[in-house]
Image (spheres, grey):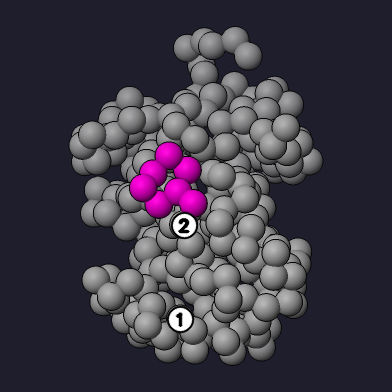
């Protein structure tokens, strides 16, 4: 593409800015449609000032990921109905200087899961209670899933808050064996297993708890094959990779960013090319 004074900038805020796969998907889609946009990483050292920069520099939009999905909310002007309900955002759209927060995590995760299994009536163990977990919990509950939300002891208050909001059981990881034992679906929404961190190569769910026929999803995308998903595949489970959720999130966000229907297959091919 040719950069000009008319080029619209979309940024990305979050700790995974070095490893995100969004750049390839969005820029390929924009090029395919001939849109004068570019998607780039932002390095944030002061969240409030970063948000002010989006507003005052006329940046068209921004994607938001950990650790800012909830902490960014006080700096926005408005939330759409879904993100207000969830209490977390994954996308900011700049409407003439007014910053509107929205979320696609729940819809993206649900779509990725539904490609492998129906969630209605299924017992689901959701590990983690951060911004992505919040969005996913509401979408899964609305789709008929029977949730249990578990979090680390030191952050169990977040599980309590989310469980109370959604209307489902919650607790700390001491309940993991019991919950997974009666679940057909297990989802990790924490950074556990993420590459180039102290969590790399680790899983919160012991392999012994996994059994054939379960569906196991990990929203971590780097590496694609996390320890949890390796263990799940070895145990005969159906595996849902984080990049499938990433794809559908990106599809939903693209329309929010540009107002244009996304070229799904172009985005899928861009994501697939990163595996080679």
Q: Is residue 186 placed above or below 67 in the rendered structure?
A: below
Q: Which residues are drawn in magenta?
A: 195-201
Is residue 191 in sight in this rendering? yes
Kindly state the secondary structure of the residue where label 1 is placed.
helix
The image shows residue 102 at horizontal and vertical percentages of 45, 54
For label 2, the residue is 202
The image shows residue 173 at horizontal and vertical percentages of 38, 78
Q: CA distance from mark 2 to mark 1?
A: 16 Å
Residues at marks 2 and 1 touching, judged by CB atoms closer than 8 Å: no
The image quadrant that residue 242 belongs to is bottom right
For label 1, the residue is 176
| Secondary structure that dominates the magenta span | loop
Q: Is residue 212 placed above or below 217 in the rendered structure?
A: below
**Foreground pick, 191 / 131:** 191
Kindly state the secondary structure of the residue where label 2 is placed.
loop
- The answer to whether residue 146 is left or right of residue 239 is left
Residue at 74%, 70% in the rendered image: 236
The extreme front residue here reads 208
- The answer to whether residue 204 is left or right of residue 208 is left
């Amino acid at each position: 593409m040719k950069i000009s004074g008319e080029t619209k900038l979309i940024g990305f805020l979050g700790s995974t800015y070095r490893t995100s796969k969004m750049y390839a998907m969005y820029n390929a889609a924009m090029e395919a449609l001939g849109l004068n946009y570019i998607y780039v990483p932002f390095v944030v050292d002061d969240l409030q000032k970063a948000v002010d920069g989006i507003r005052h520099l006329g940046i068209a939009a921004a994607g938001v990921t950990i650790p800012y999905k909830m902490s960014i909310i006080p700096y926005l002007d408005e939330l759409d109905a879904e993100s207000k309900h969830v209490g977390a955002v994954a996308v900011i759209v700049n409407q003439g200087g007014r910053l509107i927060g929205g979320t696609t995590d729940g819809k993206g995760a649900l779509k990725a899961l539904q490609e492998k299994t129906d969630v209605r009536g299924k017992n689901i163990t959701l590990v983690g209670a951060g911004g992505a977990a919040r969005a996913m919990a509401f979408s899964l509950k609305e789709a008929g899933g029977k949730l249990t939300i578990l979090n680390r002891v030191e952050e169990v208050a977040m599980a309590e808050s989310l469980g109370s909001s959604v209307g489902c059981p919650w607790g700390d990881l001491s309940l993991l064996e019991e919950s997974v034992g009666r679940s057909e679906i297990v989802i990790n929404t924490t950074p556990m297993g993420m590459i180039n961190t102290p969590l790399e190569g680790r899983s919160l769910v012991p392999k012994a708890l996994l059994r054939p026929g379960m569906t196991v999803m990990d929203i971590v995308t780097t590496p694609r094959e996390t320890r949890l998903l390796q263990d799940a595949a070895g145990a005969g489970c159906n595996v849902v990779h984080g990049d499938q959720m990433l794809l559908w999130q990106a599809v939903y966000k693209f329309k929010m960013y540009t107002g244009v229907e996304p070229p799904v297959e172009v985005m899928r091919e861009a994501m697939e090319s990163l595996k080679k």
